[in-house]
Every structure is written in C-alpha cells, then in structure tokens.
Image (cartoon, rainbow, N blue to C red):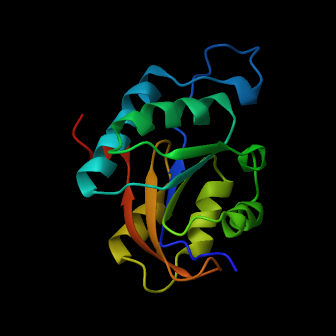
Amino acid sequence: MLAAMKTLFLLRHAKSSWDDSVLDDFDRPLSDRGRKAAPLIGRFMTAQGWQPDLALVSPAIRARDTWQLVAPELSAPVETRFEPAIYMAEPEALLTLLQQSDTPGSVILVGHNPGLEQLADLLAGPQSEPQARARMAEKFPTAALARFDVATLEPGGAALTDFVRPKDLPS
C-alpha cells in the first residue's frame, strides 16, 4: 500500500525560446523571460512555507532548466527524478505516474501543457478555492503553479488551494 500524498504542486515549465528554428521541441531552452520567472516561483514557494519532498520533472530542456532555477530558491534540497513519461503526456498518464510515486509528503510535477493543465482540471474537486479555480480556468501560462491538498489521487479528489502566475508576483 502506497502512502498517501498530502500536497501536490503542478508547475508548468517557464517560457521557452523559439529563437533557434532547427532545435527539436524537446531541446528548446528557456527564454530570458522564463529565466526570470522560474526563480520568482521558487522564492514564492519558500515564502509560503511550501517545500516539496519529491520533484518529478520532464527531461525536456525547458522543464529541466525551470526546475534548476526553482530548486535553489527552496528552503531545502528536493529529491529529483527526471521522468521521460512526463514529456508530452496525456493527463491520465501523469495521474498514473503520480499514483505510483511513493512519497507520503508533497510532490511537485514540472511538465507541459496541455497535459498539465488538463490534469489540474481533472484533479480539482468541488472543495477547490473558487478564485484559484477561476484564474486557472482562464489560462495556465508558463511558470504557473497550482497547489492542491490531496484527499485522493483520483478525478475530483483534490482541492485546488492556490494558483499563482509569475505576473502575480513582485519581480
């Protein structure tokens, strides 16, 4: 029996660069805007006292780079696993990956749209915070962070408590 996860953070990778048209999608780096936004999210998490126990990160360059800018801003080191299954994953595949993670505390998943946004929508139950839900429904932009209190890792089994975009934070 797996221990139940208490908190789940879904972090969309920061803004990527399209400057090099020959790069494969997987290899796109962060843009200047993305390199500025990612640490803001990490500092915000620390200010809120949010500390993940495990990071599940897409191996795509922009997701890895996002995590490498967020992680040093957190209050403690985080066990990190680069999971190929996250890249371009459907929400059901992401949910399965989370269900198989054996972390009793909190997990941050760093991934991509549309799968990440669809997973967030799938998990957010009726007990979710209405303003956070409305902001998330409007758009799940790059470097946005959704925080859930998890009752069960099933559709509707978590409460979206917070949804933060880099533009919401002081730079």
Q: Is residue 85 above or below residue 107?
A: above
Left-right relation of 160 to 120: left
Q: Residue at x 48, y 73 (%)?
A: 6
Q: Tell me if residue 45 can be seen.
A: yes
**Placement of the N terminus among the 4 image quadrants:** bottom right
- 44 over 67 or under it: above or below: below
Q: Is residue 131 left or right of residue 22?
A: left
Q: Which quadrant, please, contains the C terminus? A: top left
Task: Tell me residue 109's x, y (percent).
Answer: 58, 53
Tell me which residue sits at (43%, 85%) in the image.
127
Rendered location of residue 108, percent (x, y): 52, 54
Residue 159 at what x, y percent from top left? 45, 78
- Name the residue furthest bottom: 126
Tell me if residue 108 comes above or below residue 158 in the rendering. above
Q: Position of residue 34 (x, y in %)?
A: 46, 29
Would residue 15 be visible to someone looking at this image?
no
> Is 123 in front, or is 5?
5
Residue 121, located in which quarter of the rendered image?
Answer: bottom right
